[in-house]
Image: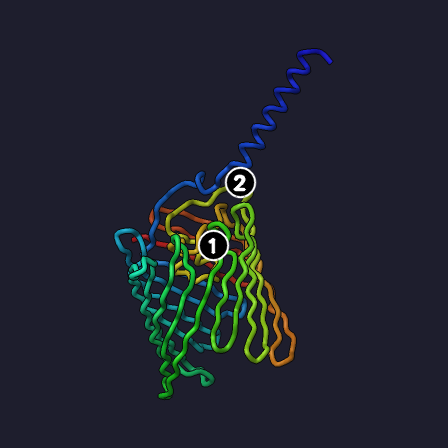
């Protein structure tokens, strides 16, 4: 083997070693384009194959540090034959530090649920307080207490609790306990991507349900860092208002491409499957707005639009 050929092999080896070293040290979050965007309004519109419409809208005001101050959320579901459920949330968030130095958020919420032409459901109003405990900028628990007042005059008091666990700055699981069921959320991460969310619900009456959401991303195209976490609303499994402020740690660094959803359950001893749903996403950015559009065989319309007025 001549000396020139030996030098060429050594040079190529050095380049490969350097490339591997650089790749292992690559930080996609540092490489993301930083484009601050704090929407005043979010709208969501979908029409499924049964011609059921789901229209959602969020309105926000912010504090000087871009944390959410107040919000209003309205969700209206309308069936093909005109039956309708409308739910409205209005919330005000207070941020404070207690006497021992722990950081907290208090979210005071009024929920109004109105039904139209549905004899199987009662309208109601909820008065809710959420106490949110923070540590190192991440949510550790959410304690909810509330009273529900039905249109027929009956009332009920309820409370529930949700706990979160993390690995580094990734939320890896949470447990949601109510009087009726315990629901466990597992978040599977790799390579700065949230690949799968598994939601397992165990009812006190032994009814069970499991749902699995799987996501794919571009291998090379990074998503933008808007400051405001838009993907919180696409995933929809963490409380969106808090996830929007990145209080559950990192989100996926790469551009979202698709979602696949399926599941199964057992209701009163009867097994059933949840029909799978698949969506492929494209993102449209214009001046003052970001839109996530989904192409899906399960619906004719599926759009999230974030608008900064």
Q: Which residue shows up at 49% across the image and 52% down it?
A: 170
| SS label for mark 1 | strand
Residue 189 seen by the camera: yes
Tell me if 76 is positioned left or right of 22 in this view: left
Residue 96 position (above or below residue 208): above
Q: Which residue is mark 2?
A: 220
Residue 139 position (above or below residue 128): above
- Sort mark 2 into few (<14), some (14-19) or many (20+) by Cα contacts within 10 Å: few
| Outermost right residue | 1
Q: Which residue is mark 1?
A: 293
Callout count? 2
Residue 95 seen by the camera: no
Residue 197 position (above or below residue 115): above
Q: Please tell me which residue lies in front, 197 or 77.
A: 197
- Sort mark 1 into few (<14), some (14-19) or many (20+) by Cα contacts within 10 Å: some
Q: Please tell me which residue lies in front, 119 or 99.
A: 99
| SS label for mark 2 | strand
Location of the N terminus by quadrant is: top right
The image position of residue 214, as x and y in percent, is 57, 56
The image position of residue 81, as x and y in percent, is 47, 77
Q: Please tell me which residue lies in front, 38 or 293.
A: 38
The image position of residue 286, as x and y in percent, is 38, 47
Foreground: disc 2 or disc 1: 2
């Amino acid at each position: 083997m001549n000396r020139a050929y030996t030098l060429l092999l050594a040079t190529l080896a050095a380049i490969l070693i350097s490339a591997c070293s650089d790749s292992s040290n690559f930080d996609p979050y540092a490489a993301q384009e930083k484009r601050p965007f704090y929407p005043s309004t979010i709208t969501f519109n979908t029409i499924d194959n049964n011609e059921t419409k789901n229209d959602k809208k969020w309105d926000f005001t912010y504090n000087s540090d871009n944390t959410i101050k107040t919000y209003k959320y309205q969700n209206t579901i309308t069936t093909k034959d005109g039956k309708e459920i409308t739910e409205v949330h209005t919330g005000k968030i207070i941020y404070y530090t207690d006497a021992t130095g722990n950081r907290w958020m208090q979210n005071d919420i009024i929920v109004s649920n109105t039904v139209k032409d549905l004899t199987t459901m009662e309208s109601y109003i909820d008065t809710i307080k959420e106490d949110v405990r923070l540590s190192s900028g991440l949510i550790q628990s959410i304690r909810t207490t509330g009273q529900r007042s039905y249109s027929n005059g009956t009332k009920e008091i309820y409370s529930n609790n949700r706990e979160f666990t993390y690995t580094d700055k990734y939320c890896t699981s949470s447990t949601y306990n109510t009087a009726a069921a315990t629901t466990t959320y597992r978040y599977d991460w790799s390579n700065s991507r949230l690949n799968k969310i598994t939601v397992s619900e165990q009812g006190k009456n032994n009814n069970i349900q499991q749902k699995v959401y799987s996501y794919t991303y571009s291998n090379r195209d990074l998503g933008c860092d808007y400051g405001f976490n838009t993907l919180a609303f696409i995933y929809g499994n963490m409380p969106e208002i808090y996830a929007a402020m990145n209080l559950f740690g990192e989100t996926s660094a790469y551009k979202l491409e698709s979602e696949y959803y399926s599941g199964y359950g057992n209701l009163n001893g009867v097994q059933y499957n949840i029909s799978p749903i698949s969506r492929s996403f494209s993102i449209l950015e214009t001046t003052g707005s970001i839109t996530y559009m989904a192409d899906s065989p399960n619906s004719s319309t599926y759009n999230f639009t974030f608008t900064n007025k």
